[in-house]
Amino acid sequence: MKKPSEILLLEKYKVKLYEENDYQISSLDNWYTYSNIFLSTNEFRPTSLIGLKVYDNDDKLISDCLIGAKAGATGINLDSTLISYGRILVCCSNAIFKLSLPGLNLEWYRIADPATCFGIYNLNEDYLVHGELELTRLDKDGKIVWKQSGRDIWTTPEAHDYFAIYEDYILATDWEYNRYKFDYDGQLLEEYKVFPKNE
């Protein structure tokens, strides 16, 4: 039995997420056969595959699915999933998938970054995706409200203090330690240089 990479405990449900990058979609030799498979396109071998299973409080399986996309690889982490409006949103490679709970029916997916999506966050009634190359604001229906990029990728070599959402602005730092302050409408308010923190 494969161990999940993350378990989300909700009031009525438990959601288990599995990194399934070795999963062979057409094979019968996988450790588990998912009921539904949702891919951002059928013309490729996905870079990232993530399995989801929803259980009730008695550990009875309610639903399961596999999602996949191709670009940069995305690992499951604390910021790569979001529970919002009774739905689950998951970063998978360059895409965001929004699935119903507990049924895991696909509501939409959106390519939110050319490379990979690091995290997804609530931003008022919308979502903000922290991608490798772009910050993207999506509305509840998955429509792109705005995108912003920096001079380099949206992380630093040390990954310290590089991205944060505040009450009325967003801070993001690129690989060259350029820091950008955006308002919630995606307008650049300020740009300045920061210096790496000492270990």
Image (cartoon, rainbow, N blue to C red):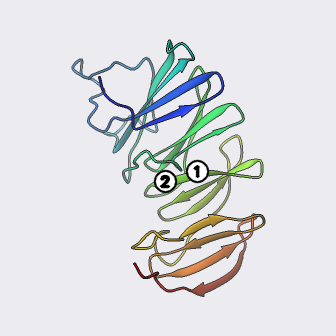
Pointer 1: residues within 10 angstroms few (<14), some, or many (20+)?
Answer: many
Q: Distance between the residues labelled 2 and 1?
A: 8 Å
- Specify the label residue 6 is tagged with: none
Residue at image position (53%, 50%) is: 79
Rendered view: 24 above or below 76: above
Which amino acid lies under the numbered mark 1 shown in the image of this protein?
Ile
Residues marked 2 and 1 touching at CB (< 8 Å): yes
Residue lying at the far front in this picture: please name it: 199
Residue type at mark 2 is: Cys
**Where the C terminus falls, by quadrant?**
bottom left
Q: In this view, does 116 lie to the left or right of 166?
A: left
Residue 167: x and y in percent read 77, 64
Between residues 147 and 189, which one lies in front from this camera angle?
A: 189
Helix, strand or loop at mark 1: strand
Residues packed near mark 2 inside 10 Å, few (<14), some (14 to 19) or many (20 plus): many
Figure check: 134 above or below 74: below
**Can you give x and y, in whole percent of width and height, for residue 109 in the image?**
56, 39
Q: Quadrant of the N terminus?
A: top left
- Residue depicted at 42% across the width and 82% down the height: 198
Query: At 45% from the left edge and 68% from the top edge, which residue is drawn?
Result: 159
Residue indicated by mark 2: 117
Give SS at disc 2: strand
Query: Which residue appears at 27% of the width and 23% of the height?
Result: 26
Q: Which of 25 and 155 is in front in this view?
A: 155
Closest to the observer: 44 or 193? 193
What percent of the width, then of the height, locates residue 68? 41, 37
Left or right? Give the position of 35 relative to 138.
left
Q: Total label count?
A: 2
Q: Mark 1 points at which residue?
A: 120
Q: Quadrant of residue 43?
A: top left
